[in-house]
Structure formats: C-alpha cells, structure tokens
Image (cartoon, grey):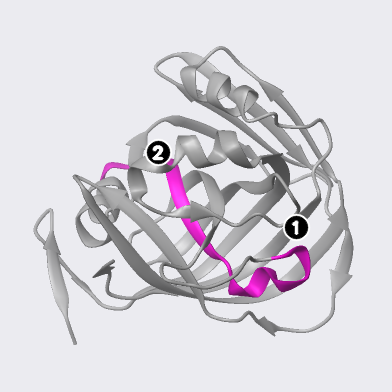
Amino acid sequence: MASHLIQGRTVGMPVRVRDAEVCSAFFPVRADAARAVIAYSGLDVAEVLPGKAVCVLLFVDYRDGDLDTYHEFGMAFLVRPPGAAGSVGLGDLRRAGVFVHWLPVDQAFTLEAGRTLWGFPKELADIELRLGSPYKRCVLRKDGRLVLDLLIKPGAPVPGATAMAPLDAYTHREGVTRRVPWTVRARGARIRPGGALIRLGNHPIAKELSELGLPKRAMFSSSISRAAMTFGEATQV
C-alpha cells in the first residue's frame, strides 16, 4: 500500500473518511463563462443543457477521517472526462467528472495533505457551519472578507444506505492536471429541487461566481448526514 509523509505523519492510501456531513447545491451557469474559468486545467465543462454548465457548491463537516476533523467548502464544475466523445446531457450526469476549482479548509494538516497528495486547490479560510437546525448553513470568509452565505434546506429522504457510483475528481496544481478516484457511501441522504439560498459577499471568488450567471434558484440540492469516502492515488492526466 502506498503511503506519504505529511508533517511527520504517515498517510496511507487510499485515504479514508469514516464520517462526514455533506451539503451541496447544483447551479446551472453559463457554459462559456465556466469554460473560461477552468481553461487553465485543459478540461472542458459538461454542457448538460445547450449553453449551460453546472457549478457545484458544497460544504462538508469532516468528523472522523485519516486527515483529522475539519470544515471544507468546495467550488467545482461538472466536466467531460478527458478524451470522452460526445456531449454529457442532463440525463447522463453519471458520465461527468468533477473538476475542483477552489477548496478552502480551516485546518493546516488537511491543507498540506490535500495539496501534496492530490493537487487539491486548498487554502485556509474561516468556515462557519451551522448544521444543528433543519436548515444547513455555511458562512465562508477569506482574508476577512465575506465570500458567501449558503443555506440549504434538506429535501425528501433517499431510503437506505446508498453506494454512489465511483466518481472521478479532477484537480490542477503547478501546471499538472490530475485525476483522483473517489467513492462515497451515504446514509441519511436527502434531495430536493431548488432548496438553496445564496448571498454573495465582496471577495474575488464571489465576483467570479456572479460573473458565471449564478441564478437565484439551484437545479437541485442534496444533503448527506453520514457519508463515508475514500480518495485514491492521483494520476496525471
């Protein structure tokens, strides 16, 4: 089994998360604007509708895992897998990969591990999660400036334990694009149309989101009260 040394600690692969709470919202955005945002990666967005790509905003409370406990926020885009022929339509989202454009966290160990092991674009930020009420809320600040305030209302339950199809996450760091195999097993999953309310701040990332044409209404939102995940060894694309 491969292993890596991070801050004097040995981290084995795959990296395992045993318990996390995950909330996410999927927004339709202008494909041309999204394509320009991620052009540096060499990847192309998946146009799920003509002229429309999908921006995924998510926040996670990692409660038990190999990289300790921490909070995380993610800004990602659904992308066509490298070399894939044809388009990825709304009914075929399982074929899409997820390109992680920005991934602030609130702890230094996971910051270094994420950058070193997979090339994740992790930065330190102030991530306030409020998960104890019927509404799930994330208030994200970076360098003392509000990035966003995201509120998600959980929807209808998805019964039982759900082993989601393996996903490919993509990252780009220091000129290299990588593929990261990622699996998720979910308990307490809920989903609903819409279900998200967002307020943007005055940080440059908020401006970037605004320029994507982020609508007031999400396509759909989801929440997982107990998620277990594995992240495999990254490979260069």
Closer to the camera, 131 or 79?
A: 79
The kind of residue tagged 2 is Asp
Residue 208 lies, in percent from the top left, at 54, 25
Q: Which residue is mark 1?
A: 222
Q: Secondary structure at mark 2?
A: loop
Find residue 156 and report its image quarter.
Answer: bottom right
> Which picture quadrant has residue 182?
bottom left
Q: Position of residue 36 (x, y in %)?
A: 48, 35
Between disc 1 and disc 2, whose residue precedes? Answer: 2
Q: Is residue 131 left or right of residue 193?
A: left
Quarter containing the N terminus: bottom left
In percent of the image, x 40 and y 60: which residue is there?
A: 170
Q: List the residue tagged with mark 2.
A: 106
Please state the extent of the stretch shown in magenta in the rendering: 89-108
The three-letter code of the residue at mark 1 reads: Ser
- Residue pictured at 60% horizontal, 28% vertical: 209
The answer to which of 52 and 165 lies nearer the viewer is 52
Q: Is residue 143 visible?
A: yes
Q: Is residue 230 left or right of residue 26?
A: left
Residue 66 visible in the displayed image? no
Residue 48 position within the rendered picture, expressed as x and y whole percent measured from the top left: 71, 57
Does residue 190 sit above or below 27 in this rendering? below
Q: Is residue 74 left or right of residue 40?
A: right
x and y percentages locating residue 212 in the rendered image: 62, 30
Determine whether the residue tagged by mark 1 lies in a helix, strand or loop. Answer: strand
